[in-house]
Amino acid sequence: KTVYVNGRVSDGDGVGTGFADGDLKSLDLQFYREGVGVSCASDPNNCYQASCSVAPNTSTELYYSCTVNVSYLADSTMDGGAYPSQVWNAEVIVKDDADQIASLIKTFEMQTLLALTIPSSIAFGTFAPGEETTSLNNAEYTLTQRGNDVASVMISGTSMSCTGVGSIPVENITWATIDVGATHASATSVTATPSDAGLSIGTNDTGSLSQNLYLNLIMPMGVGGTCTGNLTVEAASA
C-alpha cells in the first residue's frame, strides 16, 4: 500500500526554490503507529521514514510531496485489529538553516487485512492400491502471511473421484502440523466440515510468517485411474 502525504510549508526568511538556496534545510516524514512514538526505528509493523521532495510556490512557501510504501504487515488500528485504541500518525518534520524544527501531524486508521498465500493445488503422485504416504513422500503445504491479522487455518475437503474405477474417501486424506506419515497418531483425517488445523500464523516480522501443513494419502483397494477432489484451506481470524 502506498501512502501519499502532500502539503505546503512556509518560512518568512524565504525558501528559494528548494533546500539548496533557501532557509529550509530538510523536510521529512515519519509515519508510525502512535504507540511507538516519532523516534521509532524503521519497522514494517509500525514505523516508516521518508524523505520528501519540494517544489517552489512563492518566495516564502514550498509545496512538498512525500511517499511511503507501507507493508501489508503494518499494525491494524481498526476494531478487531491489534491496536484499536491507537491511530497512525503522519508527522511532517521541517528543519531550517538555524536548526529550528516544526512539525505537523495528520492521523490515519490502518485497516485490518486477513490474507494468506495458499497453494492452489496438491499432487500426491502415483500410488498402488493399499499404499500410503509417509514423512518421506507426503505433500508439504506452506501457508504464508500476507496481511496484518493473525490467521488461523480451517481445512475441509471432498472425496476424490477416479477416472478408472472407484473413489478415495475424503477421510483417506490426512493432515498434520508436523512432518509425519498418513497413519501417525498426530495425523487427522480431512472431513467435509471445516476443522481448525491448530495453526496460528502471526504478523510480527521478527517471527515466522509461514507455517506448514503436511498432507498424506491412504490409497484404498479397488481404485484405479487419475483421482481428483477438492481440498479447502482457508484463513480465519484467530
Image (cartoon, rainbow, N blue to C red):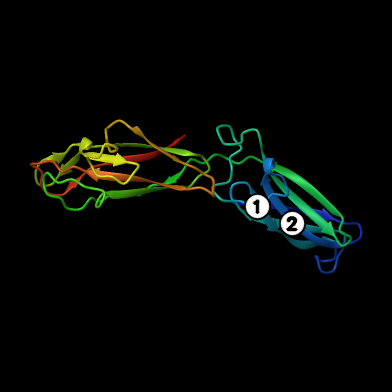
Crowd tier of the residue under label 2, counting other residues whose Cα lies within 10 Å: few below 14, some 14–19, many 20 or above: some
State whether residue 120 appears in this view: no
**Residue 28 horizontal/vertical position (percent):** 74, 56
**Residue 81 horizontal/vertical position (percent):** 56, 35
The reply, left or right, for residue 106 in relation to residue 59 is left
> What residue sits 81% from the left and 66% below the top?
17
> What residue sits 60% from the left and 41% below the top?
110
Name the secondary structure under disc 2. Answer: strand
The kind of residue tagged 2 is: Asp
Per the image, the residue denoted by label 2 is 28
Q: In terms of depth relative to the viewer, which is nearer, 109 or 97?
A: 97
The reply, left or right, for residue 161 in relation to residue 208 is left
Residue 192: name its quadrant. top left
Per the image, the residue denoted by label 1 is 48
Report, in whole angstroms, how far the alpha carbon at label 1 lies from the one at label 2: 11 Å
Residue at the limit of the structure toward the top, as seen here: 193
